């Protein structure tokens, strides 16, 4: 895995141990630590160790390692909190809600009426529209 770093990136600085963080676990490619803005107790972030801004910038190997760690985090949350649910949230770009531009996955316990909302403005496009879009996407794989 290529080692990339950015001097002033807050998560690169956490990975390097230059800034404090409450680390839960790590492996070669990822670091899991508590989110300082925790929405619910147990809210963890899984960050890539190399600097990569977003999901679309990840090599397949790193993307796999990220989700493996997210599953590991979810299992620990399940065992400790027995929550009503677990959400996984991953934002790429400011328009998508990303505020730290070093790729990370949120894994957090959920409870009924815990105040976390996400509006999903469903458009229900016709099948032929979905086929057209899928064909476009296949050209880029
Ligand atoms: P995003 O909106 O980019 O998906 O989320 C960034 C998350 O990083 C936020 O939930 C925020 O609370 C968390 N965060 C920002 N700075 C720090 C930090 O220095 N340490 C930790 N542990 N979390 C941080
Ligand atoms: Zn970084």
Image (tube, rainbow, N blue to C red):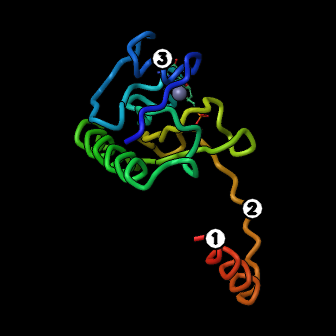
For this rendering, which residue is in front, 51 or 132? 51
Q: Is residue 26 above or below residue 83?
A: above
Residue 95 appears in the picture as rendered: yes
Please give the name of the residue rendered at 58% of the width and 43% of the height, measured from the top-left corner. 54
Circle 1 residues within 10 Å: few <14, some 14–19, many ≥20: few
- Label 3, ligand 2: CB separation under 8 Å: yes
Query: What residue is pinned by disc 3?
Result: 13
Residue placed under numbered mark 2 in the picture: 121
Viewer-nearest residue: 90 or 83: 90
Mark 1 lies on residue: 140
Q: Earlier in the sequence, mark 2 or mark 3?
A: 3
Q: SS class of the residue under badge 3?
A: helix
Crowd tier of the residue under label 2, counting other residues whose Cα lies within 10 Å: few below 14, some 14–19, many 20 or above: few
Q: Residue at x 73, y 84 (%)?
A: 132
Q: Position of residue 9 (x, y in %)?
A: 57, 21
Q: Is the CB of the residue bearing disc 1 within 8 angstroms of ligand 1? A: no
């Amino acid at each position: 895995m290529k080692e990339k770093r950015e001097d002033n990136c807050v998560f690169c600085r956490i990975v390097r141990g230059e800034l404090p963080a409450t680390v839960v676990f790590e492996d070669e490619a990822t670091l899991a630590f508590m989110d300082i803005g925790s929405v619910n107790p147990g809210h963890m972030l899984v960050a890539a160790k190399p600097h990569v801004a977003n999901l679309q910038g990840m090599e397949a190997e790193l993307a796999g390692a990220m989700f493996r760690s997210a599953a590991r985090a979810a299992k620990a949350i399940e065992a400790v909190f027995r929550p009503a649910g677990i959400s996984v949230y991953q934002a790429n770009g400011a328009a998508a809600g990303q505020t730290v531009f070093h790729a990370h996955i949120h894994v957090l316990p959920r409870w009924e009426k815990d105040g976390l909302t996400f509006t999903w403005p469903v458009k229900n496009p016709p099948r032929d529209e979905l086929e057209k879009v899928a064909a476009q996407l296949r050209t880029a794989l």
